[in-house]
Amino acid sequence: MPSASLPIVQDLVLIGGGHSHAIALKKLGMQPLAGVRVTLITEALDTPYSGMLPGHVAGIYSHKACHIALQPLCQFAHAQLLIDSVIDLDLENNRVICANRPPVPFDFLSINIGSTPATLSIPGASQYATPVKPVREFLATWEQLLKQVTQTPQTPLILSIVGGGAGGAELAMAIQTRLKSLQPAVAFQLHLFQRDAQLMPHYNAWVRDRVQKILRQKGVHLHLGETVCELSRHQVRCESGLSVECDRIFWVTQASAPPWLKAAGLATDSQGFISINNYLQSVSHPHIFAAGDIATLVNHPRPKAGVFAVRQGKPLYNNLKQALLGKPLKSYIPQQQYLSLLGTGDRSAIAAWSSLAGESPLFWFWKDYIDRAFMAQFSHLPLIPETPALKNAIAKEAAGRTK
């Protein structure tokens, strides 16, 4: 533990409580850096673990089981916790601009805020669809929906999901399983729209065919080769002329980045994600780092998948430490192939590795073990007295939840 008498020499500010930052904070608690004040700015007191969210929707995991509690993690890391939204960066003066507090100065900055589905190009999407990210808002909508159908199970319900990638397909399997399991039985339909002729085009043929078969067996209405062109309050319209009435629309399409990153002056790719080098540094501002979905490795681009955010946690911490100590950074190159485990909603899973794939309840047990092991590292952290700043953040967050 760093001595309280040591002067603060440098400020390290982390924006976002994503997977990479959670791991970095854990390591900062285990290996504190003398003279460094660490501050986490995030919008909530907990952060979702993406690997377990479909299982949560399916009713397998509780909210607590699939969310990392940031309060004890920041206490363990001796970090200030600020609950707020970041809206801009002042890169001339090295300050983070927040929505509800004075600017936060930094010497080094790291950004791990994830991504959101791109909706702006589709008329009506931003008004009438519920994006799956931010996850917190999606889960609030989902819990409200579950409460609604529990109270009025015989009222017909029609749901639609736009986006037939892995995220949309896994969400569809989870929703269909959960709603079918409710007692008394709920009268509902679930529609899934995909602009390509097949679901999950980045997976091999066996996985695509198997997922489509499972969804059809579960009763999901698949609309393949249908490009959604407009949404209204209770309708999805496609370029082909297909129109489907629905009560709720979930949006699970290609990821996008908030515009303030590019507007602040950071170098970004064509989609607005922060361009980073092999050291996880911004290519335009070397004192700024980024990881997870919000960043694009210019030399080694990879899909926006949670597995990369998890694996970037350790190299991010190492390079932040090296930068703060004025030492050479270490290159990080992500793996080209990675294991994908997709839950089918009913305690079975599909495993895919390159051209290899299969489905079995054993794969679910494997996935469940991996996910629980990841979450376990953030449990039972040593209790450390709360700082005044942390107490204020907790009180503010609690007040916000009661409104």
Image: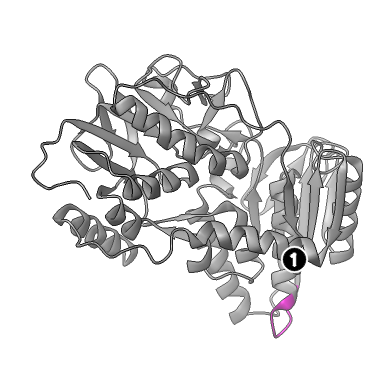
Q: Quadrant of the C terminus?
A: bottom left
Q: Is residue 250 left or right of residue 158?
A: left
- Highlighted magenta segment, given as a residue range: 181-187
Location of residue 227 by image quarter: top right
The spot of residue 390 in percent (x, y) is 22, 55
Q: Is residue 364 left or right of residue 277?
A: right
* Residue 158 seen in the figure: no
The spot of residue 261 in percent (x, y) is 42, 26
Q: Residues within 10 Å of mark 1 (few under 14, many from 20)?
A: many
Q: Nearer the viewer, residue 210 or 130?
A: 210
Q: Nearer the viewer, residue 157 or 390?
A: 390
* Residue behind mark 1: 176
Q: Is residue 196 left or right of residue 143?
A: right
The spot of residue 332 in percent (x, y) is 54, 27
* Residue 223 seen in the figure: yes
Q: Nearer the viewer, residue 99 or 65?
A: 65
Name the main secondary structure of what is drawn in magenta: loop
Q: How many marks?
A: 1
In the image as oriented, which residue stretches furthest toward the bottom? 184
Q: Nearer the viewer, residue 22 or 82?
A: 22
Q: Is residue 401 left or right of residue 237?
A: left
The answer to whether residue 23 is magenta is: no
